[in-house]
Amino acid sequence: MNLDDVVNAFVPGPRVRISGRADGPLAGLSFAVKDLFDVAGVPTGGGNHDWAAFNPVPERHAWAVQTLLDAGADLVGKTITDEVSLGILGENAFDGTPVNTAAPDRVPGGSSSGSAAAVAAGLCDTALGTDTGGSVRVPSSFCGLYGIRPSHGRVDVTGMLPQAPTSDTTGWFARDAQTFARVSTVMLGEAPGPLPTRLLVAVDAFGFADPEVAEALAPMVARLGRIVGDVREEIMAPQGLSVWARAQRTLQPVEAWQTFRPWVESANPRMAFSVAAGLLNGARMPEADRVWAALMRQEARARLRYLLPPGTILCLPTTPFPAPKRGLPQPVLQALKDRISCLCAQGGLTGSPQVSLPGANVDGAPVGLSIIGGRGTDAALIAVAKAMEAAS
């Protein structure tokens, strides 16, 4: 395996490498970790050069890192992230933007950009990321990978740098469904299965995506329907996808400001304009808006509980478009981020598990199809991923 960093996926400096247990179920696999996860004796950089200076070097591995090492996988490095996970496109003003090998002139997606780029380039077999507002799902779609946002609270986040704790999750990537299932079995503590028996197609989400995306994903939806058997159309967000997104964009910045306020006020750190603007947005959020968003979260959770009883999954485009070009101006990027959040907000709002499946392209760039299940049905989604690859 080529461990040279040809895509700027790994954080600058000496590469951390730790061998896993020789006889574990993941023996022979390699993994990388987003630089939000603690590795004992190595600073957790968080994508910002002032973060590590303000925080002590960890003495223990994060739970997710230790779990993969105990299962036999070899750690081959820490990967670049958007600053303190406050980004969705994968561009970092300090460490640069990792290369999306599936579409080199486009962003990889963030904030788990380096992890996705490393897996897509074949520099490791799997990689840890985090997902609060879409930070595993979006790079999975943009880079053509399998990726999971588990049920909120399903995976231990000890040793993972928080952003918005009521939405934060640990996720992971893989290039193929078999590796994805092996890693997921270890991380979830449960083997894949059983397959669901009903599929809902989120027509509001498909209508919101670019027409070319919906068209490219149609064969995958048809294949998914053949696997599941019972298919019907449904509206995921009757209040409106943009309303769900507004609720998530209210709650997440408020929590992010609470998380990073001590650091910002004590260290006066250097950060990109877009990151500072996001934190200021959270600091200035009116209480009435936060109360409204909390109520909308309850409505969204009730909606998915109704739609997704045991045995039912829902599918939608992971992102409304393929990866944007690199280096676009901030006003253009903000409009793109707003559209992305309309298809990702349900994760943080409801805590439901979501898997992004590769297999479609628009103008040569990947787009993913997502499947969502009721909370706690993560293993069924992994079984669907395996079945979809076998049926392709």
Image: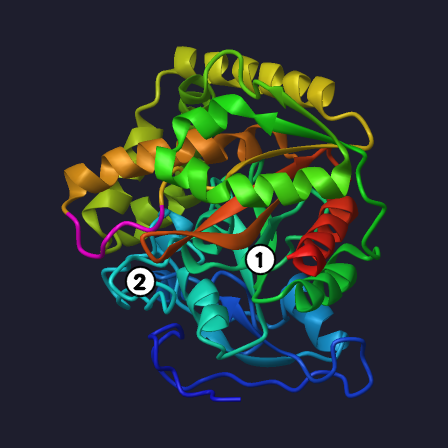
In 3D space, how far apart are the residues under numbered discs 1 and 2 (Cα atoms)?
32 Å
In contact (CB < 8 Å): disc 1 and disc 2: no
Q: How is the protein colored in the picture?
A: rainbow
x 43%, y 59%: residue = 143
Q: Is residue 390 above or below residue 244?
A: below
Counting from the top left corner in percent of width and height, residue 7 is at 34, 75
x 78%, y 49%: residue = 379
x 66%, y 80%: residue = 29
Of pointers 1 and 2, the one earlier in the residue sequence: 2
Which of discs 1 and 2 lies nearer the camera? The answer is 1
Residue 43 in sight in this render: no
The rendered magenta stretch, by its main secondary structure, is classed as loop
| Residue sitting nearer the eye, 293 or 232 | 232
What residue type is disc 1 on? Tyr
Counting from the top left corner in percent of width and height, residue 61 is at 63, 70
Indicate left or right for 59 with 188 as reference.
Answer: left
Total numbered labels: 2
Q: Is residue 273 magenta?
A: no
Q: Which secondary structure, mark 1?
A: strand
Counting from the top left corner in percent of width and height, residue 346 is at 54, 30
| Residue sitting nearer the eye, 309 or 55 | 309
The region drawn magenta spans 322-328
What residue type is disc 2 on? Asp
Q: Where is mark 2, residue-wise?
A: 50
Name the disc covering residue 146, or none.
1
Counting from the top left corner in percent of width and height, residue 111 is at 41, 53
Q: Is residue 203 above or below residue 67?
A: above
